[in-house]
Image (cartoon, helix red, strand yellow):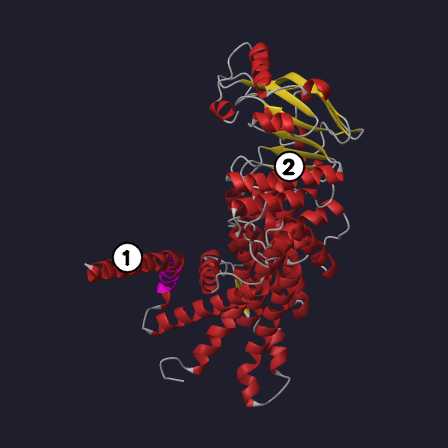
Amino acid sequence: MSSFLTLSIVQSALELGCIYALVALALFVSFSLLNIADLSTDGCFTLGCAVGAVVTMAGHPFLAFFAAMAAGVASGFITAFLQTKMGVQSILAGIIVNTGLYTINLMVMGFSSNINLFNTNTIFSMAKELSESEVYRSWYKIIIVVCIVLLVCVFLAWFLNTSLGLSIRATGDNEYMVRASSINPGFTITVGLCVASAMTALSGAVLGQYQKSCDINYGTGQVTIALASLIIGESLIKKGSIFKRVIFVVLGSCLYRFIVAIALRMNLPAEALKLVSAVIVAIAISFPYLKEKAGFYKHRRDVMRQASKNV
Amino acid sequence: MLQITDISKTFNPGTVNEKTALQNVSLHLDSGDFATIIGSNGAGKSTLFNAITGAFYVDSGRIVLDEEDITFKKEHLRSKEIGHLFQDPLLGTAPHMSIEENMALAYMRASGKHSLFGRITKSDKERFREHLALLDMGLEDRMKNPVGLLSGGQRQALTLLMATMVTPKLLLLDEHTAALDPATAEKVLNLTKRIVAERNITCLMVTHNMHQALELGNRTLMMNGGNIVLDVSGEERANMTVEDLLEQFKVQVGEQLDNDRILLSK
């Protein structure tokens, strides 16, 4: 390992990559499959973190994950309800829920903008006690987050190949087909958003225990970062089974963290993080388009060269 | 099988864009009837189909399918029993999902045999393969391919297969071969004839081809201005020529048929 990227930087990039990958997977469901831009992501992430932190403080670090996911499902349900039953446009529904969640999150956190878990047992502190070995001590965090992400990936891949999962994928793929099939788009959108929001909230809860704290601003900008991870992951693989695509979304998230880590190593101040994120997102989104353009220019050059040879 | 009584539909009522698309239309189809529908643009053919499938609710009248009043039944519930093919071959299938997954969706919804968390089983795959083999397009060996890679004709044939895999009570074909090249259109049409005849499916088909209108099925309907203006079957239809049909149009509608597509395809 070069001195530029130390082991601890690589490790924390992997750890954060896996934790935030859950949000990218949520956008994979809502944005890639359902074709809905769910802007409640930021608030939902903090919601998961807050609920998780409160339950963890009560002494149930495992239960915290399920509580966070249940809160996520509730948030996703409200977003979907506004869209499917109240005639609110999907982007507006997300913004409305996101705004409302800010207050809800403060309420969950007991009207404080910050909670710390330093004196509380988390799954990380509990796992740390399992062994004294130095190797284990430096890798146990990665083992935990990889296990969580793998579990979610396996569940998601299984779910998206069930009858219900297929219906959800069709809902975002061809509106006309759905209307002519006996798929109730209101139902599939609701289930899809609930699953997505549960993953977002789970991500928040894991991050809270990982950072030993919860802050009302943890969620800010999550949707952009997750979108960047998702697009990086999807541009790495054009087609393939759902499981492959899901795994590549996780890889995309890890790659994004590496890019950020490298950017920060170039002596950029930590305040520049959001700008760096925005630039990476812009590059990631335009990359496939630019690649196609470059292919065309190369093709044109080859044709011209061939033509001038023949003259 | 299908009993439509006095249905009407006006779009944008009370505005300058007000358009009466259906005016007291009544239609009765017996089980196994195969009726073709002709009429110029804006005659109400597609509107009639959309009223039957539930894309909108009618302003007045009743629609009864197989002794069940479906006038206010939701669209996604009606589509369990009604197959609908559009002119655009891209509308009937999900492009980013594989052939197998598309067929599974169609099969699961219509057969009612799968739970929400059911998966595609080996026997499902075998069934899909057998159905695809009937198309004779080699699709049975490409079941994992995304549907977006197929040609328009292949997609329309697949859509037809999906709509009829579980025999629907009613099949609506809205010019489903019009956007295909002649050879492919012929193939899809032959397939349609075979499937409809084999399963004795009650079927309504919009066409702009006068020959098809007389040759296919057992009834010919003509629509104009939101009404059914002509309904021929049996011997009268058997003796009818394309010229007679055009003449009838002039008599019924009181004007020359102004549609190039109809005139050119006679």
* Residue ID at (67%, 63%): A66
| Magenta stretch, main secondary structure class | helix
* Residue ID at (51%, 53%): B149
B5 w.r.t. A51: above or below? above
Span of residues in magenta: A272-283
Q: Say what secondary structure mark 1 lies in.
A: helix
Q: Is residue A301 magenta?
A: no
- Position of B232 with respect to A262 (left or right) is right
Q: Quadrant of residue A277?
A: bottom left
The reply to whether residue B195 is in sight is: yes
Viewer-nearest residue: B86 or A256: B86
In the image, residue A238 lies at what x, y percent? 48, 61
Instruction: Measure how far apart labels 1 and 2 are at the Cα level.
Output: 44 Å
Viewer-nearest residue: A15 or A59: A15
Q: Quadrant of the N terminus of chain B?
A: top right
In the image, residue B94 lies at what x, y percent? 57, 48
Look at label 1 and name its amino acid. Answer: Arg
In the image, residue A114 lies at what x, y percent? 52, 62
- Residue A300 image label: 1
Q: Are marks 1 and 2 on the same chain?
A: no
Residue receiving disc 2: B84
